[in-house]
Image (cartoon, coloured by chain):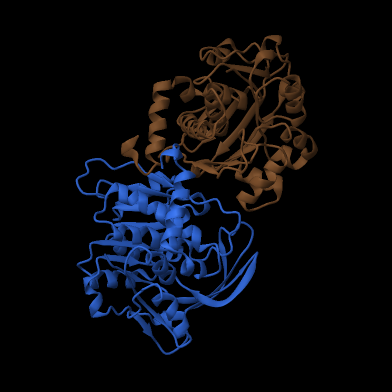
Chain colours: A blue, B brown
């Protein structure tokens, strides 16, 4: 089933310990859409400026991504400049030029009304809510957010959280949102705000899914958490977009399945890790552009081998 | 097969967000021995003072642990005072009174000469090496260390590393030892110093085993790393000794197996996580004293459920 993602389509200028990249295609919706495109049909709602070239758009359309929802505004595209050092666990932002993104008002093409899966990437929660309300018939709503919205736009964010089937955030965001240092208690507090399930991403340590009795139909007790590994990588070229690629792999796989079952959710966590592991192997979107479903399946089996006791049976 | 562990048998005075404990039994060898005692015979070489009571010793002997190698010296036992705050990932040391441990010179009872598995807990590498040389016939040597020895006793430590089949350390220690921020490259650099295999503990995120071509007999390529989860816990009462309990579960299980195979190693990683998860549920050694093999097996199955895709088959 198809996914609609709303979020940033942007340019990134990056410095890492291994190199530099000048104004390459990035943005949460871009990474998400590319990762999800290996599993299902993806539609993007976003805004770009006149510096967004046909070559940039072709990066998406070559993967079959529907870009009719990307508005072309007069001005320059969102442009983020950042750098990474050491273990590259966190980016240092050097500049954030919102440009046309500052006035982003999502416009959803009429043809997108039949979308089944909605993904609200990390944007102003006021816009997330507006998109969610414009898509009342979606089957599943999944979303992301970040420290900035948690700390300074809490009231708006809480309205979005009440609408979510699944929230994807990282450890620090879960702690900030709840004031709980213990992740299990933080997860319970997050789900009390609305999300039926919660995926907490731990960077190089993988991710944990937390469930409630509302996570799947017919539950009387909440399922145990599920932990998916990340791939130990000897070289990370560019961590930008790893979390969005995780989300794309996770949600893309879920959207490709006949039903939201615990087993599908667990496998989606692994596919999320797989797409995140590809994303960081080259600058920007390069690695996601050039992978194949065969390569994805091969890496999925590798994820099983590094985490399952009885690998001979796989 | 039997394990000999050399390390600290000590008292801990602790403050955590949930409570306090005054001069309770602790020490790396204590936690290790209790955790390993559920899998195999354990012998302890250490030193205590006149404040070490028969009741303290009974905590070990009740679990069948051989305490003949614990020397009783004139003076007070090693006493560590520390506190934990927030997510309790790191202890703040308030005082370290080495007492009789300052002059510790391991004396190995003649009856321990037939020991098959040697564990060198975190003590002065000069002493670790002396014990290793006094036990030339052991089948497997596994060890631990810490930042202090890595930073200031590097030359002695490297002689120990050259003797190890398996080293167990945490992320920070692996990075400090090698100067590599990337964990995969750090692991390769550690194994180049001697250890055939390396277990890096990630605290609440689990642990990763890294292998070389020397990890198991008959290899031509190094096996992929293996990641074991930690249990998401809603309440951590006292993290002291969690790493030593992991080591005890890991090594105790390995010592109970007929051969060092990749499958046994993977299962040992899970048993390490299981014993670490018990250790933190109560102050000091209380939880390890009172668990059972049945409870351990039940939690092992829980570790499978939180990390394996196809739990129905387990």
Residue A99 visible within the image:
no
Residue A278 visible within the image:
yes
- A3 or A47, which lies in front? A3
Query: Does residue A267 appear to the left or right of B75 in the view shown?
Result: left
Q: Quadrant of the N terminus of chain B?
A: top right
Query: Does residue B259 appear to the left or right of A108 in the view shown?
Result: right
* Residue B117 lies in quadrant: top right
As drawn, B283 above or below A4: above
x, y percentage for residue A144?
38, 62
* Residue A239 lies in quadrant: bottom right
* Residue A122 lies in quadrant: bottom left
x, y percentage for residue A252?
35, 62
User: What residue is rendered at 33% in x and 64% in y?
Assistant: A155
Query: Does residue B70 appear to the left or right of A96 in the view shown?
Result: right
- B191 or A81, which lies in front? B191
Q: Quadrant of the C terminus of chain B?
A: top left
x, y percentage for residue B163?
72, 31
As drawn, A185 above or below A45: above
x, y percentage for residue B174?
65, 44
- A205 or B47, which lies in front? A205
User: What residue is rendered at 24% in x and 49% in y?
Assistant: A216
Count of numbered circles on the image:
0
Q: Residue furthest right?
A: B155
Q: Residue furthest bottom?
A: A74
As drawn, B238 above or below B39: below
């Amino acid at each position: 089933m198809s996914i609609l993602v709303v979020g940033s389509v942007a340019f990134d200028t990056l410095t890492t310990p291994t190199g530099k990249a000048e104004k390459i295609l990035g943005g949460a919706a871009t990474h998400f859409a590319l990762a999800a495109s290996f599993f299902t049909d993806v539609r993007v709602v976003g805004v770009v400026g006149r510096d967004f070239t046909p070559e940039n758009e072709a990066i998406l359309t070559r993967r079959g991504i529907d870009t009719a929802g990307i508005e072309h505004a007069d001005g320059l595209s969102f442009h983020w400049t950042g750098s990474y050092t050491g273990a590259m666990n966190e980016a240092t932002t050097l500049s954030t030029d919102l440009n046309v993104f500052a006035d982003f008002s999502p416009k959803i093409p009429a043809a997108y009304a039949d979308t089944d899966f909605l993904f609200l990437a990390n944007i102003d929660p006021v816009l997330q809510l507006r998109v969610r309300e414009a898509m009342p018939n979606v089957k599943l709503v999944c979303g992301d957010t970040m420290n900035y919205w948690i700390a300074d736009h809490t009231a708006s964010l809480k309205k979005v959280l009440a609408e979510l089937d699944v929230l994807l955030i990282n450890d620090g965001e879960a702690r900030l949102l709840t004031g709980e240092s213990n992740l299990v208690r933080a997860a319970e507090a997050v789900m009390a705000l609305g999300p039926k399930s919660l995926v907490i991403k731990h960077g190089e340590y993988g991710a944990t899914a937390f469930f409630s009795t509302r996570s799947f139909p017919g539950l009387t007790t909440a399922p145990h958490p599920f932990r998916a590994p990340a791939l130990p990588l000897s070289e990370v070229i560019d961590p930008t977009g790893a979390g969005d690629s995780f989300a794309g792999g996770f949600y893309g796989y879920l959207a490709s399945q006949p039903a939201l079952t615990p087993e599908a959710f667990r496998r989606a966590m692994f596919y999320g890790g797989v797409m995140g592991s590809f994303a960081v192997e080259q600058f920007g979107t390069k690695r996601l552009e050039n992978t194949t479903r065969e390569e994805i399946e091969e890496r999925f089996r590798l994820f099983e081998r590094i985490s399952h006791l009885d690998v001979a049976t796989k």
